[in-house]
Image: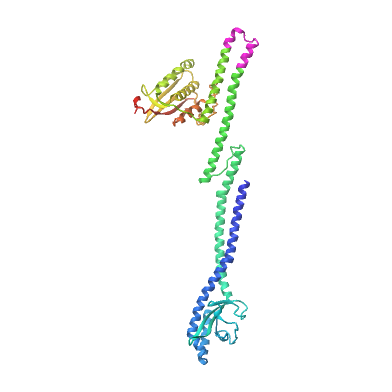
Amino acid sequence: MKLHRTLYLKLLLAYLLFFLLSFIMISSINSRMILNDLTRTRAEALYRESRLVATLYGNEIYRGGTARENALEQLTAIDTYISAEIRIIDANGRQVLDSRSSGTPVFEDFDPGSIGSYYLVSDFYGTYDEDHLSVFYPITGKYQIRGYVVIQIPMSDLYASRDRLLNISYLTMLFMYLLSLLVLVVFTYAVYIPVRRITTAAEEYARGHYDYDPAVNGRDEIGYLAGTLYYMASEIGRSEDNQKKFIANVSHDFRSPLTSIRGYLTAMLDGTIPPEMHEKYLQVVLNETDRLTKLTNGLLELNSLNTKGIVLTISDFDINSVIRQICETFDVLCSEKKISIELILSGEHLFVSADMGKIQQVVANLVDNAIKFSHSNSIIKIETTEKGDKVFVSVKDSGIGIPSDAQKLVFDRFYKTDLSRGKDKKGTGLGLAITKEIIQAHNQNINVISTEGVGSEFIFTLARSKDPETGIS
Protein backbone atom coordinates (compact mmCIF):
# COMPACT_ATOMS: atom_id res chain seq x y z
CA MET A 1 0.00 0.00 0.00
CA LYS A 2 2.81 2.37 0.87
CA LEU A 3 4.33 1.91 -2.56
CA HIS A 4 1.06 2.73 -4.31
CA ARG A 5 0.43 5.75 -2.11
CA THR A 6 3.91 6.98 -2.97
CA LEU A 7 3.21 6.41 -6.64
CA TYR A 8 -0.04 8.35 -6.45
CA LEU A 9 1.72 11.16 -4.53
CA LYS A 10 4.31 11.29 -7.28
CA LEU A 11 1.52 11.57 -9.82
CA LEU A 12 -0.02 14.49 -7.92
CA LEU A 13 3.35 16.21 -7.54
CA ALA A 14 4.02 15.74 -11.26
CA TYR A 15 0.61 17.23 -12.01
CA LEU A 16 1.28 20.27 -9.81
CA LEU A 17 4.81 20.66 -11.20
CA PHE A 18 3.46 20.54 -14.73
CA PHE A 19 0.90 23.19 -13.82
CA LEU A 20 3.61 25.41 -12.28
CA LEU A 21 6.00 25.01 -15.21
CA SER A 22 3.20 25.77 -17.66
CA PHE A 23 2.34 28.94 -15.74
CA ILE A 24 5.99 30.02 -15.70
CA MET A 25 6.33 29.33 -19.40
CA ILE A 26 3.22 31.35 -20.26
CA SER A 27 4.13 34.23 -17.94
CA SER A 28 7.74 34.48 -19.13
CA ILE A 29 8.58 32.83 -22.43
CA ASN A 30 5.12 33.13 -23.92
CA SER A 31 4.79 36.69 -22.60
CA ARG A 32 8.02 37.70 -24.28
CA MET A 33 7.06 36.01 -27.53
CA ILE A 34 3.65 37.73 -27.56
CA LEU A 35 5.24 41.12 -26.83
CA ASN A 36 7.82 40.68 -29.57
CA ASP A 37 5.16 39.67 -32.05
CA LEU A 38 2.92 42.61 -31.08
CA THR A 39 5.87 45.01 -31.31
CA ARG A 40 6.92 43.76 -34.73
CA THR A 41 3.35 43.81 -36.05
CA ARG A 42 2.68 47.32 -34.75
CA ALA A 43 6.06 48.53 -36.00
CA GLU A 44 5.26 47.28 -39.48
CA ALA A 45 1.93 49.10 -39.44
CA LEU A 46 3.55 52.33 -38.22
CA TYR A 47 6.32 51.93 -40.78
CA ARG A 48 3.73 51.97 -43.55
CA GLU A 49 2.19 55.11 -42.06
CA SER A 50 5.59 56.79 -41.77
CA ARG A 51 6.37 55.97 -45.39
CA LEU A 52 3.04 57.50 -46.44
CA VAL A 53 3.77 60.65 -44.40
CA ALA A 54 7.28 60.95 -45.87
CA THR A 55 5.98 60.50 -49.39
CA LEU A 56 3.07 62.92 -49.15
CA TYR A 57 4.28 65.62 -46.77
CA GLY A 58 8.04 65.23 -46.42
CA ASN A 59 9.10 67.82 -48.94
CA GLU A 60 6.16 70.14 -48.07
CA ILE A 61 7.51 70.50 -44.56
CA TYR A 62 10.76 72.02 -45.74
CA ARG A 63 9.08 74.61 -48.00
CA GLY A 64 7.84 76.61 -45.06
CA GLY A 65 4.84 78.93 -44.96
CA THR A 66 1.40 77.63 -45.75
CA ALA A 67 2.72 74.31 -47.02
CA ARG A 68 4.36 73.60 -43.69
CA GLU A 69 1.22 74.58 -41.75
CA ASN A 70 -0.88 72.32 -43.98
CA ALA A 71 1.58 69.49 -43.41
CA LEU A 72 1.34 70.00 -39.64
CA GLU A 73 -2.47 69.87 -39.81
CA GLN A 74 -2.27 66.61 -41.72
CA LEU A 75 0.19 65.15 -39.22
CA THR A 76 -2.12 66.11 -36.36
CA ALA A 77 -5.05 64.44 -38.13
CA ILE A 78 -3.03 61.28 -38.72
CA ASP A 79 -1.93 61.34 -35.05
CA THR A 80 -5.55 61.41 -33.97
CA TYR A 81 -6.43 58.57 -36.34
CA ILE A 82 -3.62 56.18 -35.41
CA SER A 83 -3.15 57.38 -31.81
CA ALA A 84 0.56 57.91 -32.30
CA GLU A 85 2.84 60.92 -31.97
CA ILE A 86 4.50 61.98 -35.24
CA ARG A 87 7.81 63.82 -35.32
CA ILE A 88 9.81 65.21 -38.21
CA ILE A 89 13.51 65.28 -37.35
CA ASP A 90 16.22 66.53 -39.71
CA ALA A 91 19.45 64.69 -40.38
CA ASN A 92 21.26 66.63 -37.64
CA GLY A 93 18.81 65.51 -34.93
CA ARG A 94 16.83 68.77 -34.69
CA GLN A 95 13.07 68.37 -34.42
CA VAL A 96 11.33 70.18 -37.27
CA LEU A 97 7.68 69.35 -36.47
CA ASP A 98 5.75 67.48 -33.78
CA SER A 99 2.11 66.59 -34.02
CA ARG A 100 1.72 67.14 -30.27
CA SER A 101 4.03 70.06 -29.38
CA SER A 102 5.62 73.15 -30.88
CA GLY A 103 9.09 72.77 -29.40
CA THR A 104 12.23 72.17 -31.47
CA PRO A 105 14.51 70.10 -29.28
CA VAL A 106 17.77 68.74 -30.59
CA PHE A 107 18.57 65.04 -30.14
CA GLU A 108 22.36 65.05 -30.19
CA ASP A 109 22.75 61.28 -30.34
CA PHE A 110 20.06 60.87 -32.96
CA ASP A 111 21.37 58.50 -35.64
CA PRO A 112 18.81 56.06 -37.09
CA GLY A 113 21.53 54.53 -39.24
CA SER A 114 23.25 53.14 -36.14
CA ILE A 115 20.13 51.36 -34.89
CA GLY A 116 20.32 48.65 -37.51
CA SER A 117 16.53 48.48 -37.76
CA TYR A 118 13.58 50.63 -38.66
CA TYR A 119 12.24 50.76 -35.11
CA LEU A 120 13.54 51.32 -31.61
CA VAL A 121 12.15 50.61 -28.12
CA SER A 122 13.47 53.16 -25.61
CA ASP A 123 12.65 56.39 -23.80
CA PHE A 124 13.80 58.15 -27.02
CA TYR A 125 16.88 59.88 -25.70
CA GLY A 126 15.29 60.75 -22.38
CA THR A 127 12.21 62.36 -23.89
CA TYR A 128 9.71 60.06 -22.14
CA ASP A 129 9.37 58.62 -18.65
CA GLU A 130 8.52 55.22 -20.10
CA ASP A 131 9.61 53.22 -23.09
CA HIS A 132 8.07 54.04 -26.47
CA LEU A 133 8.08 52.26 -29.78
CA SER A 134 9.70 54.61 -32.32
CA VAL A 135 9.52 53.86 -36.05
CA PHE A 136 11.77 55.68 -38.55
CA TYR A 137 11.38 56.40 -42.25
CA PRO A 138 13.79 58.68 -44.16
CA ILE A 139 12.71 61.81 -46.04
CA THR A 140 14.85 62.10 -49.17
CA GLY A 141 15.38 64.90 -51.65
CA LYS A 142 17.97 65.41 -54.34
CA TYR A 143 19.39 61.96 -53.68
CA GLN A 144 20.14 62.63 -50.04
CA ILE A 145 18.45 62.14 -46.65
CA ARG A 146 16.96 65.43 -45.47
CA GLY A 147 15.33 64.05 -42.31
CA TYR A 148 13.18 61.33 -40.81
CA VAL A 149 9.57 60.71 -40.06
CA VAL A 150 9.39 59.26 -36.52
CA ILE A 151 6.10 57.79 -35.32
CA GLN A 152 5.91 56.85 -31.65
CA ILE A 153 3.48 55.05 -29.36
CA PRO A 154 3.93 54.17 -25.68
CA MET A 155 4.90 50.57 -24.96
CA SER A 156 2.23 50.55 -22.26
CA ASP A 157 -0.32 50.18 -25.07
CA LEU A 158 1.46 47.05 -26.27
CA TYR A 159 1.84 45.81 -22.70
CA ALA A 160 -1.93 46.15 -22.28
CA SER A 161 -2.54 44.18 -25.49
CA ARG A 162 -0.06 41.55 -24.36
CA ASP A 163 -1.77 41.26 -20.98
CA ARG A 164 -5.15 40.79 -22.64
CA LEU A 165 -3.75 37.95 -24.73
CA LEU A 166 -2.01 36.48 -21.67
CA ASN A 167 -5.27 36.60 -19.76
CA ILE A 168 -6.87 34.57 -22.52
CA SER A 169 -3.95 32.13 -22.30
CA TYR A 170 -4.29 31.93 -18.53
CA LEU A 171 -8.02 31.28 -18.80
CA THR A 172 -7.42 28.64 -21.45
CA MET A 173 -4.73 27.05 -19.30
CA LEU A 174 -6.99 27.12 -16.26
CA PHE A 175 -9.80 25.54 -18.26
CA MET A 176 -7.46 22.83 -19.54
CA TYR A 177 -6.20 22.11 -16.05
CA LEU A 178 -9.70 21.88 -14.72
CA LEU A 179 -10.40 19.33 -17.43
CA SER A 180 -7.18 17.48 -16.60
CA LEU A 181 -8.13 17.61 -12.93
CA LEU A 182 -11.41 15.98 -13.89
CA VAL A 183 -9.42 13.33 -15.77
CA LEU A 184 -7.29 12.86 -12.63
CA VAL A 185 -10.41 12.41 -10.53
CA VAL A 186 -11.79 9.88 -13.01
CA PHE A 187 -8.40 8.13 -13.02
CA THR A 188 -8.45 8.04 -9.23
CA TYR A 189 -11.84 6.36 -9.04
CA ALA A 190 -11.54 4.26 -12.18
CA VAL A 191 -7.92 3.10 -11.89
CA TYR A 192 -6.09 4.05 -8.71
CA ILE A 193 -8.70 3.04 -6.12
CA PRO A 194 -9.45 -0.32 -7.85
CA VAL A 195 -5.71 -1.02 -8.18
CA ARG A 196 -5.25 -0.15 -4.49
CA ARG A 197 -8.07 -2.54 -3.60
CA ILE A 198 -6.47 -5.24 -5.75
CA THR A 199 -3.16 -4.62 -3.99
CA THR A 200 -4.85 -4.88 -0.61
CA ALA A 201 -6.52 -8.09 -1.72
CA ALA A 202 -3.16 -9.51 -2.86
CA GLU A 203 -1.68 -8.69 0.54
CA GLU A 204 -4.62 -10.37 2.27
CA TYR A 205 -4.23 -13.44 0.08
CA ALA A 206 -0.53 -13.51 0.93
CA ARG A 207 -1.56 -13.66 4.61
CA GLY A 208 -3.85 -16.59 3.88
CA HIS A 209 -7.16 -14.69 3.88
CA TYR A 210 -8.45 -16.21 0.65
CA ASP A 211 -12.06 -15.14 1.24
CA TYR A 212 -11.19 -11.43 1.04
CA ASP A 213 -13.25 -9.70 -1.67
CA PRO A 214 -11.52 -6.75 -3.39
CA ALA A 215 -14.98 -5.31 -4.18
CA VAL A 216 -13.98 -4.10 -7.64
CA ASN A 217 -17.04 -4.14 -9.86
CA GLY A 218 -16.35 -3.36 -13.48
CA ARG A 219 -16.29 -4.92 -16.90
CA ASP A 220 -13.00 -3.42 -17.99
CA GLU A 221 -9.53 -4.93 -17.72
CA ILE A 222 -9.14 -3.88 -14.07
CA GLY A 223 -12.46 -5.45 -13.11
CA TYR A 224 -11.45 -8.59 -15.00
CA LEU A 225 -8.10 -8.62 -13.20
CA ALA A 226 -9.81 -8.26 -9.81
CA GLY A 227 -12.27 -11.03 -10.62
CA THR A 228 -9.49 -13.30 -11.85
CA LEU A 229 -7.41 -12.62 -8.75
CA TYR A 230 -10.39 -13.30 -6.50
CA TYR A 231 -11.16 -16.51 -8.37
CA MET A 232 -7.50 -17.57 -8.14
CA ALA A 233 -7.48 -16.91 -4.38
CA SER A 234 -10.72 -18.87 -3.99
CA GLU A 235 -9.21 -21.78 -5.90
CA ILE A 236 -6.04 -21.64 -3.78
CA GLY A 237 -8.13 -21.53 -0.63
CA ARG A 238 -10.24 -24.42 -1.85
CA SER A 239 -7.08 -26.33 -2.77
CA GLU A 240 -5.69 -25.79 0.70
CA ASP A 241 -8.97 -26.93 2.23
CA ASN A 242 -8.89 -30.01 0.02
CA GLN A 243 -5.31 -30.71 1.04
CA LYS A 244 -6.27 -30.42 4.70
CA LYS A 245 -9.18 -32.77 4.10
CA PHE A 246 -6.89 -35.10 2.18
CA ILE A 247 -4.36 -35.17 5.01
CA ALA A 248 -7.15 -35.85 7.47
CA ASN A 249 -8.54 -38.62 5.23
CA VAL A 250 -5.15 -40.21 4.63
CA SER A 251 -4.26 -39.94 8.31
CA HIS A 252 -7.52 -41.64 9.16
CA ASP A 253 -7.05 -44.29 6.50
CA PHE A 254 -3.52 -45.02 7.71
CA ARG A 255 -4.42 -44.92 11.40
CA SER A 256 -7.35 -47.34 11.15
CA PRO A 257 -5.44 -50.31 9.66
CA LEU A 258 -2.38 -49.60 11.79
CA THR A 259 -4.58 -49.61 14.88
CA SER A 260 -6.12 -52.89 13.79
CA ILE A 261 -2.74 -54.46 13.04
CA ARG A 262 -1.30 -53.35 16.36
CA GLY A 263 -4.38 -54.52 18.27
CA TYR A 264 -4.43 -57.98 16.70
CA LEU A 265 -0.69 -58.51 17.05
CA THR A 266 -0.74 -57.36 20.68
CA ALA A 267 -3.66 -59.69 21.41
CA MET A 268 -1.80 -62.61 19.87
CA LEU A 269 1.36 -61.84 21.82
CA ASP A 270 -0.33 -61.47 25.21
CA GLY A 271 -2.46 -64.57 24.68
CA THR A 272 -5.79 -62.81 24.35
CA ILE A 273 -6.14 -64.52 20.97
CA PRO A 274 -5.36 -68.24 21.35
CA PRO A 275 -2.80 -69.83 19.00
CA GLU A 276 -5.41 -71.82 17.13
CA MET A 277 -7.00 -68.53 15.94
CA HIS A 278 -3.72 -66.87 14.92
CA GLU A 279 -4.08 -67.85 11.29
CA LYS A 280 -7.49 -66.17 11.06
CA TYR A 281 -6.30 -62.91 12.53
CA LEU A 282 -3.01 -62.99 10.64
CA GLN A 283 -5.13 -63.02 7.49
CA VAL A 284 -6.93 -59.90 8.80
CA VAL A 285 -3.56 -58.30 9.43
CA LEU A 286 -2.48 -59.24 5.90
CA ASN A 287 -5.62 -57.63 4.46
CA GLU A 288 -4.91 -54.44 6.39
CA THR A 289 -1.34 -54.35 5.04
CA ASP A 290 -2.74 -54.79 1.52
CA ARG A 291 -4.98 -51.81 2.21
CA LEU A 292 -1.97 -49.73 3.32
CA THR A 293 -0.05 -50.83 0.23
CA LYS A 294 -2.90 -49.78 -2.04
CA LEU A 295 -3.10 -46.38 -0.37
CA THR A 296 0.66 -45.87 -0.60
CA ASN A 297 0.75 -46.89 -4.26
CA GLY A 298 -2.07 -44.48 -5.04
CA LEU A 299 -0.18 -41.62 -3.41
CA LEU A 300 3.01 -42.51 -5.26
CA GLU A 301 1.19 -42.78 -8.59
CA LEU A 302 -0.55 -39.43 -8.18
CA ASN A 303 2.73 -37.80 -7.19
CA SER A 304 4.37 -39.32 -10.27
CA LEU A 305 1.58 -37.94 -12.48
CA ASN A 306 2.04 -34.48 -10.99
CA THR A 307 5.82 -34.34 -11.35
CA LYS A 308 6.66 -36.35 -14.47
CA GLY A 309 3.41 -36.50 -16.38
CA ILE A 310 2.12 -39.72 -17.94
CA VAL A 311 4.15 -41.69 -20.46
CA LEU A 312 1.66 -43.36 -22.80
CA THR A 313 2.17 -46.44 -24.92
CA ILE A 314 -0.41 -45.96 -27.65
CA SER A 315 -1.80 -49.01 -29.41
CA ASP A 316 -5.00 -50.15 -31.10
CA PHE A 317 -7.14 -52.46 -28.99
CA ASP A 318 -10.75 -53.59 -28.58
CA ILE A 319 -12.33 -51.47 -25.84
CA ASN A 320 -15.37 -53.77 -25.70
CA SER A 321 -13.13 -56.72 -24.92
CA VAL A 322 -11.32 -54.73 -22.21
CA ILE A 323 -14.64 -53.82 -20.58
CA ARG A 324 -15.80 -57.47 -20.59
CA GLN A 325 -12.55 -58.66 -19.00
CA ILE A 326 -12.66 -56.00 -16.26
CA CYS A 327 -16.29 -56.75 -15.45
CA GLU A 328 -15.38 -60.41 -14.96
CA THR A 329 -12.89 -59.43 -12.25
CA PHE A 330 -15.71 -57.85 -10.26
CA ASP A 331 -18.02 -60.92 -10.39
CA VAL A 332 -17.37 -61.93 -6.79
CA LEU A 333 -17.84 -58.40 -5.45
CA CYS A 334 -21.02 -57.94 -7.47
CA SER A 335 -22.38 -61.25 -6.16
CA GLU A 336 -21.72 -60.21 -2.58
CA LYS A 337 -23.66 -56.95 -3.06
CA LYS A 338 -26.27 -58.54 -5.35
CA ILE A 339 -25.40 -56.09 -8.12
CA SER A 340 -25.57 -56.94 -11.81
CA ILE A 341 -23.63 -55.30 -14.62
CA GLU A 342 -25.43 -54.70 -17.92
CA LEU A 343 -23.22 -54.21 -20.98
CA ILE A 344 -24.59 -52.19 -23.90
CA LEU A 345 -21.67 -52.32 -26.31
CA SER A 346 -21.48 -50.97 -29.84
CA GLY A 347 -20.93 -54.13 -31.88
CA GLU A 348 -18.84 -57.16 -31.07
CA HIS A 349 -15.60 -55.23 -31.44
CA LEU A 350 -14.82 -51.55 -31.11
CA PHE A 351 -11.21 -50.54 -31.61
CA VAL A 352 -9.68 -47.45 -30.05
CA SER A 353 -6.23 -45.88 -30.10
CA ALA A 354 -4.94 -45.41 -26.55
CA ASP A 355 -2.72 -46.80 -23.80
CA MET A 356 -4.40 -50.11 -23.04
CA GLY A 357 -3.00 -50.48 -19.52
CA LYS A 358 -4.00 -46.97 -18.49
CA ILE A 359 -7.51 -47.32 -19.94
CA GLN A 360 -7.94 -50.61 -18.10
CA GLN A 361 -7.11 -48.69 -14.92
CA VAL A 362 -9.69 -46.00 -15.80
CA VAL A 363 -12.46 -48.53 -16.46
CA ALA A 364 -11.57 -50.48 -13.31
CA ASN A 365 -11.67 -47.30 -11.19
CA LEU A 366 -15.07 -46.28 -12.55
CA VAL A 367 -16.59 -49.77 -12.18
CA ASP A 368 -15.17 -50.08 -8.66
CA ASN A 369 -16.68 -46.70 -7.73
CA ALA A 370 -20.03 -47.65 -9.26
CA ILE A 371 -20.15 -50.91 -7.25
CA LYS A 372 -19.01 -49.18 -4.09
CA PHE A 373 -21.75 -46.53 -4.16
CA SER A 374 -24.59 -48.64 -5.60
CA HIS A 375 -27.42 -50.07 -3.53
CA SER A 376 -27.97 -53.78 -3.27
CA ASN A 377 -30.14 -55.36 -5.97
CA SER A 378 -29.29 -52.59 -8.44
CA ILE A 379 -27.91 -52.53 -11.97
CA ILE A 380 -24.75 -50.90 -13.32
CA LYS A 381 -24.88 -50.07 -17.01
CA ILE A 382 -21.72 -49.84 -19.12
CA GLU A 383 -22.24 -48.53 -22.64
CA THR A 384 -20.00 -47.74 -25.62
CA THR A 385 -21.09 -45.59 -28.57
CA GLU A 386 -19.41 -44.18 -31.66
CA LYS A 387 -19.67 -40.57 -32.79
CA GLY A 388 -17.41 -39.46 -35.61
CA ASP A 389 -13.80 -40.13 -34.75
CA LYS A 390 -14.52 -40.62 -31.04
CA VAL A 391 -15.74 -43.45 -28.87
CA PHE A 392 -17.83 -42.65 -25.78
CA VAL A 393 -17.66 -44.96 -22.77
CA SER A 394 -20.35 -44.59 -20.08
CA VAL A 395 -20.44 -46.18 -16.61
CA LYS A 396 -23.82 -45.56 -14.94
CA ASP A 397 -24.95 -46.69 -11.48
CA SER A 398 -28.15 -46.36 -9.43
CA GLY A 399 -26.43 -45.42 -6.20
CA ILE A 400 -26.31 -42.54 -3.73
CA GLY A 401 -25.43 -39.93 -6.36
CA ILE A 402 -23.28 -36.83 -5.95
CA PRO A 403 -24.53 -33.48 -4.60
CA SER A 404 -24.67 -30.80 -7.29
CA ASP A 405 -22.17 -28.57 -5.50
CA ALA A 406 -19.67 -31.43 -5.32
CA GLN A 407 -19.88 -32.63 -8.93
CA LYS A 408 -17.25 -30.19 -10.18
CA LEU A 409 -14.93 -31.28 -7.37
CA VAL A 410 -15.03 -35.06 -7.64
CA PHE A 411 -12.08 -35.14 -10.05
CA ASP A 412 -9.98 -32.84 -7.91
CA ARG A 413 -6.96 -34.27 -6.23
CA PHE A 414 -7.34 -34.92 -2.52
CA TYR A 415 -11.13 -34.65 -2.67
CA LYS A 416 -13.58 -37.02 -1.02
CA THR A 417 -17.29 -36.20 -0.61
CA ASP A 418 -19.02 -36.40 2.74
CA LEU A 419 -21.72 -38.69 1.35
CA SER A 420 -19.13 -41.23 0.27
CA ARG A 421 -17.50 -41.65 3.66
CA GLY A 422 -20.05 -44.14 4.93
CA LYS A 423 -19.65 -46.45 1.92
CA ASP A 424 -16.07 -45.69 0.81
CA LYS A 425 -14.35 -46.98 3.90
CA LYS A 426 -11.30 -48.19 1.97
CA GLY A 427 -11.11 -45.31 -0.51
CA THR A 428 -8.48 -42.61 -0.58
CA GLY A 429 -10.11 -40.01 -2.78
CA LEU A 430 -7.38 -40.54 -5.38
CA GLY A 431 -9.05 -42.85 -7.90
CA LEU A 432 -11.00 -40.23 -9.85
CA ALA A 433 -8.10 -37.77 -9.74
CA ILE A 434 -5.83 -40.41 -11.32
CA THR A 435 -8.57 -41.29 -13.81
CA LYS A 436 -8.86 -37.69 -14.96
CA GLU A 437 -5.08 -37.35 -15.31
CA ILE A 438 -5.00 -40.43 -17.55
CA ILE A 439 -7.87 -39.27 -19.77
CA GLN A 440 -6.43 -35.75 -20.12
CA ALA A 441 -3.04 -37.26 -21.03
CA HIS A 442 -4.85 -38.82 -24.01
CA ASN A 443 -6.19 -35.33 -24.92
CA GLN A 444 -9.71 -36.62 -24.22
CA ASN A 445 -12.48 -35.60 -21.81
CA ILE A 446 -14.29 -37.11 -18.85
CA ASN A 447 -17.50 -35.76 -17.29
CA VAL A 448 -20.02 -36.75 -14.66
CA ILE A 449 -23.83 -36.50 -14.64
CA SER A 450 -25.39 -37.19 -11.27
CA THR A 451 -28.56 -36.75 -9.23
CA GLU A 452 -28.35 -37.14 -5.49
CA GLY A 453 -30.20 -40.26 -4.38
CA VAL A 454 -30.70 -41.46 -7.98
CA GLY A 455 -27.23 -42.33 -9.27
CA SER A 456 -24.23 -41.15 -11.27
CA GLU A 457 -22.97 -41.55 -14.80
CA PHE A 458 -19.32 -41.08 -15.77
CA ILE A 459 -18.60 -40.60 -19.48
CA PHE A 460 -15.17 -40.42 -21.09
CA THR A 461 -14.01 -40.30 -24.67
CA LEU A 462 -11.31 -42.13 -26.62
CA ALA A 463 -9.98 -41.78 -30.14
CA ARG A 464 -11.23 -44.37 -32.63
CA SER A 465 -8.59 -46.53 -34.20
CA LYS A 466 -7.51 -45.58 -37.74
CA ASP A 467 -5.53 -48.74 -38.36
CA PRO A 468 -6.96 -50.35 -41.53
CA GLU A 469 -6.19 -53.82 -40.11
CA THR A 470 -8.84 -53.28 -37.45
CA GLY A 471 -11.49 -52.66 -40.06
CA ILE A 472 -12.10 -49.11 -38.84
CA SER A 473 -11.55 -46.27 -41.29
Quadrant where the C terminus lies? top left
Q: In the rendered image, is residue 353 in sight?
A: yes
| Residue 345, placed above or below residue 4 | above
| Residue 186, placed above or below residue 79 | above
Q: Position of residue 435 (x, y in %)?
A: 48, 27
| Residue 159, placed above or below residue 229 | below
Residue at 43%, 22% in the rendered image: 381
| Image: magenta residue range | 261-281
Dominant SS of magenta comes to helix
Task: Give the number of callouts.
Answer: 0
Q: Position of residue 240 (x, y in %)?
A: 58, 32
Q: Position of residue 297 (x, y in %)?
A: 54, 23
Q: Nearer the viewer, residue 204 or 301?
A: 301
Q: Residue furthest top?
A: 276
Q: In the rendered image, is residue 84 in sight?
A: no
Residue at 59%, 44% in the rendered image: 199
Q: Residue furthest right?
A: 270
Residue 268 inside the magenta-drawn segment: yes
> Coloured how?
rainbow
Q: Nearer the viewer, residue 311 or 101?
A: 311
Q: Position of residue 257 (x, y in %)?
A: 59, 19
Residue 144 inside the magenta-drawn segment: no
